[in-house]
Amino acid sequence: MSTQFLDTPIEYLKGVGPQKAEILKAEISVFTFKDLLYYFPFKYIDKTSLSEVKDLHPEAGNVQLRGKISNVKIVGVKAGRRLSATLRDATGKVELLWFKNFSFVEKALKEDAIYTVYGKVNAFKGAFSVPHPEIKLYDASDKENILPMEPVYPLTEKLKSRFMDSRYFMGLVKHLLLHPDFQLEEYIPESVLKPLKMIGRKAALYYIHLPGDEKTRAAAERRIKFDEMFTLAMRSEKNKVLRLREHNGIPMNKSGKLVNEFYHNHLSFELTNAQKKVIREIKSDMAKGSRMNRLLQGDVGSGKTIVALFSMLMCIDNGFQACLMAPTEILATQHYLTLKDMLSEMPVTVDLLTGSSNKKHRQSLLERLSDGSLNILIGTHALIEDEVNFKQLGLAVIDEQHRFGVAQRAKLWNRSVLKPHVLVMTATPIPRTLAMTIHGELDVSVIDELPKDRKPVKTLHREEIYRGEVMAFLKRELEKGRQAYVVYPLIEESSKLDLNDLKTGYDVVCSYFPIPQYQISLLHGKMKSDVKDFEMHRFKSGITQIMISTTVIEVGVNVPNASVMIIENANRFGLSQLHQLRGRVGRGAEQSFCVLMTKDEMNYPSRKRIKTMCATNNGFEISKVDLELRGPGDVLGTRQSGLPDFKLLDLVKDEEIIDLAKRASAFILKNDPDLSASENQALLLYLQQHQDDHFWSRVS
Ligand code: ADP
Ligand code: MG
């Protein structure tokens, strides 16, 4: 019954009709009664206060005035034609003006009657006017003359031109909300709502449009935001329940010979407490018998690789193989070299597979992979090709996960009978609550501590006119035996313009650092991979002092002796990219520097990005600013990740509500995983109606 009413096409609403309905559909996608009720005001105006004409001033903004109307006339010609009327109160007079579509107003305005008007004050040559005010005939007996908080709806030009203004919307919505057929059943059990002090669903919808005061408005908003998150949370919590229930994860509870040997004999540094904590979390996950699906967040340089290595050793200790997938060839190669080096005295086999692995190597590698003699396979997305078959893959580690789609990842284990544990690592940390929302089905671990005696990178901003000084500074650092990166933006690897930039930049740097006294490497994505490898190798081994490159070095490259990073046209980089780039230095014991060079005039977001970079080294803080500047949609690619567009919920600011919704979902499913209890029937029905039926049918 209730749904039928809400699903009624909008043209059947009193005051709408076919013509206005077309506009509502085309302009703001309002097709049904329900759509209209979920078309929320974006602000509210307090109209309880009346201003007097004598108090008007140019910055008065929106005001409400009450007075007698006189002098209603059309003035001006052609484009200047307008309707003018005078409003006079006890303290003075002000002109009301209409420039467009005023024939209706002209007819309706009654001379000598008292009106309440509302609008924005305009000052012109010392005289005040109110263009296009809202007007209402004053009726002293009407208590509803003034609403304490009047909703203001987002309007388009077209809507305005048809007099479909906030008042109009308010009227329609009010009619619906008070209609005897309007029902909105509660679907969350009272036992959950009550302790959270959530108001009912129907009340919330009423008060979001027509709040009596700020407190009621806030309560309504809180409930609606909660609902927006709750369905999502229920789904991811349910997925978790299903995953844990499957119990077809590979139990890895043999405590490790290899792990111990590595820990006691081959680890060259002390693990940080954060690393130890995360390794324990992973160990307990993998031992459980259900599948691990864990996200490891850690700032650049926080030491995620070693955590991955320990996890892989645990896996091998239990008789399974492990793989590590990285988004670029450079990064995969580097992981390979690092791990091979670390494992050089261990009875563990490691190999590398990328797009450019040669045929012969590939052949032998695939054989060793399928007969189980290869323990660890590292590589790029070449790992997901069909011919790559593990004997028994037990753990898949995925580095820099934002570069891989979920479907791509899943290909890794589509062919396995036993599904491997999964560890995804990201160096783009986002606030924890947000991470849990975006990656609802993942457990989240955080390394929130950098290795001891790591000196924070000093970051400076320099404009182009100071290039001489910057180059002189660079020279001093190189003389101390350090190395440096100079990075150019290459927005698209194929862009000729950017590539020219890079080459000009190369010439500029060469002019300051002549060969043969200095050796300079050049690296960009268009180069053949053996040339890239060659250049990387020259830089890593210290043959070249300066590496000029595009952002191909952005992710994960590790050369501890490199202590200076110069970022050219820094204003053209995004925040997380700048932070990633900076993470390439500060990896050794020496003081490192990052110089952000700019030559263009900067707009606000660029200035803010540069300022933030100079102010903090903390990736979580940086991601917060990034989220503020760009919004979660762009930062996280939420559309790709299948997150809905929230109407009220703000993924960054509403941490408390997100958390509540998550906990409420977990609580409900903990007590009633199949939603079979009678008090949860309304909820089950609601979820079936609001998400794919299939999913929630699978529940029972
Ligand atoms: P990221 O988290 O950015 O992937 P890496 O795993 O590449 O960081 O680690 C950065 C550097 O720090 C590496 O050279 C690594 O060997 C070193 N490292 C990792 N953990 C520690 C630690 N606990 N103490 C000292 N150095 C460490
Ligand atoms: Mg890394």
Image (cartoon, grey):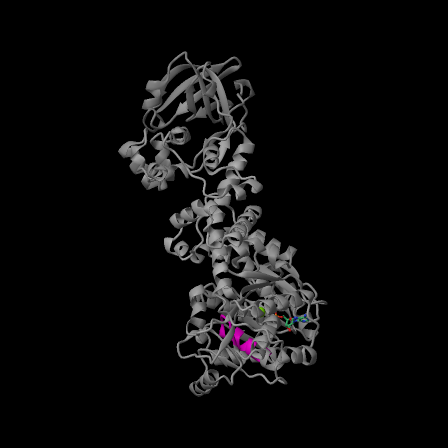
Residue 460 in sight in this render: yes
Residue 310, given in percent of the width and then of the height, sits at 61, 74
Residue 695: quadrant of the picture: bottom left
Residue 211, given in percent of the width and then of the height, sits at 50, 31
Would residue 332 be counted in the magenta stretch?
Answer: yes
Task: Specify whether 700 is left or right of 588.
Answer: left
Total marks in image: 0
Q: Quadrant of the C terminus?
A: bottom left
- Which span is picked out in magenta? 322-338
Nearer to the camera, 520 or 293: 293
Residue 172, given in percent of the width and then of the height, sits at 37, 30
Residue placed at 45% from the left, 57% from the top? Answer: 641
Residue 197: quadrant of the picture: top right
Task: Specify whether 688 is left or right of 666.
Answer: left
- Picture quadrant of ligand 1: bottom right
Nearer to the camera, 586 or 519: 586
Residue 350, given in percent of the width and then of the height, sits at 54, 82
